[in-house]
Image (cartoon, rainbow, N blue to C red):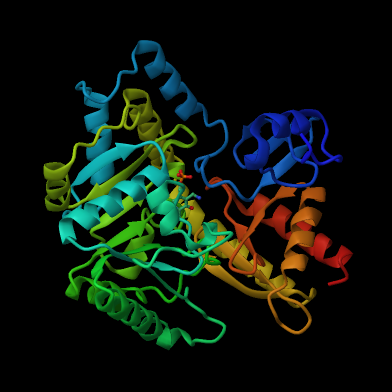
Amino acid sequence: TDALDPHIKGEALRRQRLFGAASVLFYREPLEIARGEGCWLMDVRGERYLDCYNNVPSVGHGHPRVAEAVYQQLKRVNTHTRYLHSLVNDYAERLLATFPASLSNITFTCTGSESNDLALRQAFSFTGRRGVIVTEGAYHGNSDLVTAVSPSSFRRGQPPRWVKTIPAPDPLHVPATQQAEVFDSAVAAAIQALEQEGFGVAALLFDSIFSSDGVYADPAGFIAPAVERVRRHGGLFICDEVQPGFGRTGRMWGFERHGVIPDLVTLGKPMGNGFPLAGVVTRPAILERFCQEVGYFNTFGGSPAAAAAGMAVLDALEQEQLIQRAQQSGDYLRVAITRLQASHGGIGAVRGVGLFTGVELLDEAGQPDESLATAVINGLRDEKVLIGAAGPHANVLKVRPPLCFGTVEADFFVQALAKSLQRLGR
Ligand code: PMP
């Protein structure tokens, strides 16, 4: 208990005692949320906050359709996944129909980490190689294997030698017309290093919106030459759709905008709107090779209750037209934030697609300003808006609300941002 922070009290103190060094919370005075509805969260004191951050409850907090579907299934039965259940097959069929035809098998898991772990292992067995290429600021999950390919997780040391990093896209210094070429040549250098060191390239793995690198969506198609290059060298492209997937980019899948078909796609976060449901979509030949080598069983992954949640999410996306909404609200939001640049200092690039927007915060010299971002995040909390930051300098506001976010919410956010910049003298 020596390490206990004297400022921490109440539930936060209890939490720190119980969870120790791994007890990381948002904000100096952490929030205690009691309930949620759509894009709004209510704390135990009855304060209402606009949630601009959570992409898990993607069809909205406390979505009645998802809650009801899970409840009904849990009441009936929830077995593990070695029994037949038509709902699980129905869900898999409906989900796979949203992918290109070659990606026709799915394995259900419970987390994005498990999905990336399994996808990497499939790539290793299929290619017979070990090398993996990821971006410098990548986060792909928390298992031992997946931490190795998550440079952003390292507080000390570096990823192992079989992992080579490439810079994320850099629109500040690289014109859009050269983005594809620059990305491709970084991948070429990484492949060369992996081959020289005897690892070869098993996979190029990245998040198709580069969220933890700082949110990079453009130009559409810029990843294609690098993906082709990896394939020419015998490697696979694993597309991590844990963040952009399920409609956030204004299309079902982030990779669609880039005109490429991945070899493996990993899914998670929004898939069950908070019910643990994740998965790996792949070509049958890749999965077959893996299954010849080792067995794979996931007790909870793709249970009937999980499938019920997943099915309800697909229903909500369709019936509430949330994918179109993500596109429209996202465009509206970026225009409104860009307009603030005329009246307020501190805002650099405003980028993204659909309801995934990055707002670069800069100091007076035009350099990334982490302390401004921290001050704005706290100022926004005072204005009842919850948001986080990304990027290597933690200076990119990550606006990533539930997909039911509309123009009312966008206006609320932009006014709050204007106020907090003004209070900071920007
Ligand atoms: N991939 C990406 C791109 C992620 O952002 C995350 C979670 N932040 C993961 C994988 C891991 O997912 P999970 O926390 O469900 O294991």
Q: 223 or 384: nearer the eye?
A: 223
Q: Is residue 413 above or below residue 368?
A: above
Q: What residue is rendered at 26% in x and 48% in y? A: 281
Q: 150 or 107: nearer the eye?
A: 150
Relative horizontal placement of residue 247, taking residue 297 as reference (left or right): right
Q: Is residue 79 above or below residue 246?
A: above
Q: Count the marks.
A: 0
* Whether residue 244 is visible: no
Q: Which quadrant of the view contains residue 415?
A: bottom right
Q: 353 or 380: nearer the eye?
A: 380
Q: Is residue 138 above or below residue 274?
A: below
Relative horizontal placement of residue 116, taking residue 9 as reference (left or right): left
Quadrant in the picture for the C terminus:
bottom right
Q: Which quadrant of the view contains residue 259?
A: bottom left
Quadrant in the picture for the N terminus:
top right
Location of residue 83 in the rendering, given as x and y in whole percent from the top left corner: 21, 21
Relative horizontal placement of residue 173, taking residue 187 as reference (left or right): right
Q: What residue is rendered at 26% in x and 26% in y? A: 81
Location of residue 128 in the rendering, given as x and y in whole percent from the top left corner: 17, 60
Location of residue 4 in the rendering, given as x and y in whole percent from the top left corner: 79, 38
Location of residue 66 in the rendering, given as x and y in whole percent from the top left corner: 46, 29
* Whether residue 159 is visible: yes
Q: Is residue 182 above or below residue 101?
A: below
Q: 407 or 43: nearer the eye?
A: 43
Relative horizontal placement of residue 31, taking residue 237 as reference (left or right): right
Q: Residue furthest front?
A: 2
